[in-house]
Image (cartoon, rainbow, N blue to C red):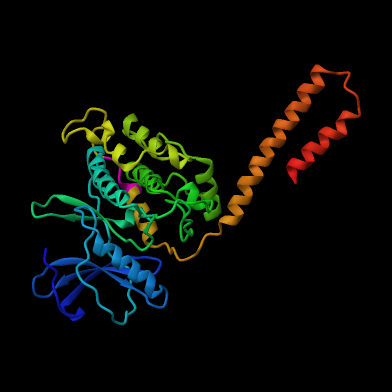
Amino acid sequence: DQPDTGEPTTWCLVAVLFLGRFSVVKRCDHRGSKRTVAVKHVNKKLMKRDQVTQELNLLQRLQHPHIVSLVDTFETSMPDTQRGGDLFFWGNLTEEKVASYLRSVLEALHYLHNCRIVHLDVKPENLLVAHNASAQPVVKLTDFGDAVQLNSSHYVHPLLGSPEFASPELVLGEPVSLTSDLWSLGVVTYVLLSGASPFLDESAEETCLNICRLDFSFPRDYFHGVSQAARDFVRLLLRTDPGRRPPAGLCLQEPWLQAPPGDGRGRGEGCLDTARLISFIDRRKHQTDARPIGGTSVVSVINLEKRMYLVLQALLVVCVAGCSDRQASLGSRPTIMWFVFRILV
């Protein structure tokens, strides 16, 4: 489509869709053509100009049917606004429809990753469900405010806002990789299938610990009617080691995603229960993501757990040695205790 030109007054505000960390996303219609677009208002007081410019330059380079396209840019004052509306609408969900949506996102990620671009903010709020001329839903990946081009293998991205969809390497302050997006997509898949968040806990720090421990399950009440193939796909993406996560291109070849429309083989039948998903969307819509998460405390706890594991191993060795050699001299015990002390400190 050719971009509509004109001043911001040529666009009519329809609804506020979503409030992000530094921006407000609105649905607007062009007064002349009635074309509907999503408009992202960036608060210049919260986000530096070079950050905005980086996102704009990135969007101008990208052309893909499942990635939002940049229509126009304006610089104005941003009035106060209220929440309302939804950025994405999933409707009645089946496993077939979820698989179709995920294929679209994976195609977008495959395109980005071939350009060495990592999105780093894949979550339901950043998946826009539009409709084409034939009224078919089309999923588009949006919000490239955190996206970067990986020119080296040692880029560390700050963890901002809720860590629900963040990969372990991002939580731990380690270098991110292209497969960091695949972890986030695994969490999105879990959410769409169940309406629940796999790692969410009472605090951000506890959520981070659950992520690093890979502490999640498939409760029967939440996954009733969900196929084993769908659960296996989630497990495929939620791997702590980034190198063990398959790239987007290989994910697209998974049988659960490749089954043709109407072919229920390997997929659960019937509609998924979306009551929890609606509650999830409402919670996310009223959640502020402006607070940076301090990863230091999480790393400290993880390191302490590793040390305690080594201590338990050392104590086990002591017990085994004590049982096998009851004649051990007392002189060897201080050496063993010194070893345990060194692990603790």
Q: How many marks?
A: 0
Q: Residue at 77% of width from left, 37% of height from top?
A: 340
108 relative to 59, above or below: above
Residue 5, image x, y percentages: 14, 75
182 relative to 332 in the view: left or right: left
- Is 97 magenta? The answer is no
Is residue 221 shown to the viewer in this render?
A: no
Q: Residue at 25% of width from left, 40% of height from top?
A: 99
Residue 249, image x, y percentages: 29, 40
Is residue 224 shown to the viewer in this render?
A: yes
Residue 135, image x, y percentages: 11, 52
Which stretch appears magenta? 272-276
283 relative to 344, above or below: below
On the image, which quarter does residue 119 sit in? Answer: bottom left
161 relative to 10 in the view: left or right: right
45 relative to 70, above or below: below
The front one of 185 and 146 is: 146
On the image, which quarter does residue 290 sit in? Answer: bottom left
The front one of 238 and 241 is: 241
Q: Residue at 79% of width from left, 37% of height from top?
A: 339
The front one of 328 and 188 is: 328
165 relative to 293, above or below: above
Residue 286, image x, y percentages: 39, 63
- Is 275 magenta? The answer is yes
Quarter in which the N terminus is drawn: bottom left
Q: Residue at 40% of width from left, 72% of height from top?
A: 47
Q: Extreme right residue here? A: 330
Q: Is the magenta stretch mostly helix, strand or loop?
A: loop
